[in-house]
Amino acid sequence: ENLESRLFAIDTFDRGAAFAHEPKRGTVSAAVSRDFYPLGPMTMCVCGNNPSLSKQLLPWSMFPAHKQVKYISSKDQFSCILTTDGKVYTFGTNQYNCLGQGGIRDYDQKIPNPVNCRVTFTQTAAGMYHAFAVATDGKLYGWGDNYYGQLGTGDGVEHVKPYLIPFYASKTTKVVGCGTDHSLVYTTEGFYAHGQNNGHQCGCIGGDGNRWLSPEKVRGETDGKDLCQLVGGTEFSAALDDEGILYTWGKGMGAGRTGTRSEAVIKTDIPEIKGKAVLIKASYKNLLVLSSKGEVWMVG
């Protein structure tokens, strides 16, 4: 529709990737902004093999708010949509109540419905079967699967609708990211992780590295850095700071190279990537990096 557009966002998991864009701006800063959402609303377009969908990418008119989309976060089983009025919609398979709509478990929601919460949000992130949303006041809400401690409540109990996470209630959340079964949260008081940690995707935070039901501080080379983006795969994580510096940790992400492991959070230098990293997204085992030169690189 607009060939002069620049790539705005990438979201990918096991079975594909989604790309979104916004009109080209006059200048592109090398600095990374935490508010990497577009300035105005985007139109959500879909296509697929489902009988209700077109084979061509077309506006999803069956979703009433398809022209007010601000951001989409997807994983293999479901997706979260943030609209310009601060609402979060979800659709997909409701395993472990990952849709956050309350009610019956394990059903398919084909058209996005709002989550069961009257709070307005500024960010959202989806894991395999859990999700988070950041409210306008910086409070963090989570829902869905919590067996490994994905929600950070300390008890492993899943939640059927958005639930104010007690640990973060006294903190202001700046950025939230989800891996398959773990979560990353950057607040005004520090950087935390919780959930499954079998590949040290939560960082080197001690113990047997399997289940972290409560948030633990992430230590490493991100200490003292202003983080802007957080993503996670199955057994690895990555972060991007406001200077475009990339950090990775976990299985397969030691120094950004395949087949190595880093238990600690380390700065990742990938010589092939020219310019600064401006956007990162994660699949099960791969990290996608968009550079300031407009190139997309895959690591893992």
Image (cartoon, rainbow, N blue to C red):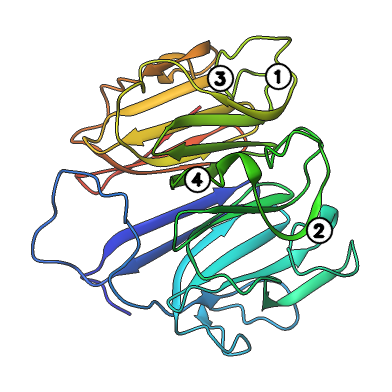
In the image shown, does 125 or 118 lie closer to the viewer? Answer: 118
Which residue is under mark 3?
250
Q: Earlier in the sequence, mark 4 or mark 1?
A: 4
Identify the amino acid type marked 3. Answer: Gly
**How far apart are the alpha carbons under marks 2 and 4?**
19 Å
User: In this picture, is 98 found above or below 55?
Assistant: above
**How far apart are the alpha carbons under marks 3 and 2?**
28 Å
The residue lying at 76 percent from left, 69 percent from top is: 101
Give the SS element for disc 1.
loop
Question: Which is in the foreground here, disc 4 or disc 3?
Answer: 4
Disc marking residue 198 = 1
Would residue 175 appear left or right of 244 to someone viewing this image? right
Which residue is under mark 4?
176
- The part of the image, by quadrant, that contains residue 116 is bottom right
Q: Earlier in the sequence, mark 1 or mark 2?
A: 2
Mark 3 burial class by Cα count in 10 Å: few <14, some 14-19, many 20+: many
Q: Earlier in the sequence, mark 3 or mark 1?
A: 1
In the image shown, does 169 or 145 lie closer to the viewer? Answer: 169
Identify the amino acid type marked 2. Answer: Asn
- Residue 74 position, x and y percent, is 59, 56
**How far apart are the alpha carbons under marks 4 and 1?**
20 Å
Give the SS element for disc 3.
strand
User: In this picture, is 6 found above or below 85?
Assistant: above
User: In this picture, is 65 found above or below 28?
Assistant: below
- Residue 257 position, x and y percent, is 44, 17
User: In this picture, is 90 found above or below 262?
Assistant: below
Identify the amino acid type marked 4. Answer: Val
Mark 2 burial class by Cα count in 10 Å: few <14, some 14-19, many 20+: many
Which residue is under mark 2?
97
Question: Which is in the foreground here, disc 3 or disc 2?
Answer: 2
Would residue 256 appear left or right of 200 to someone viewing this image? left
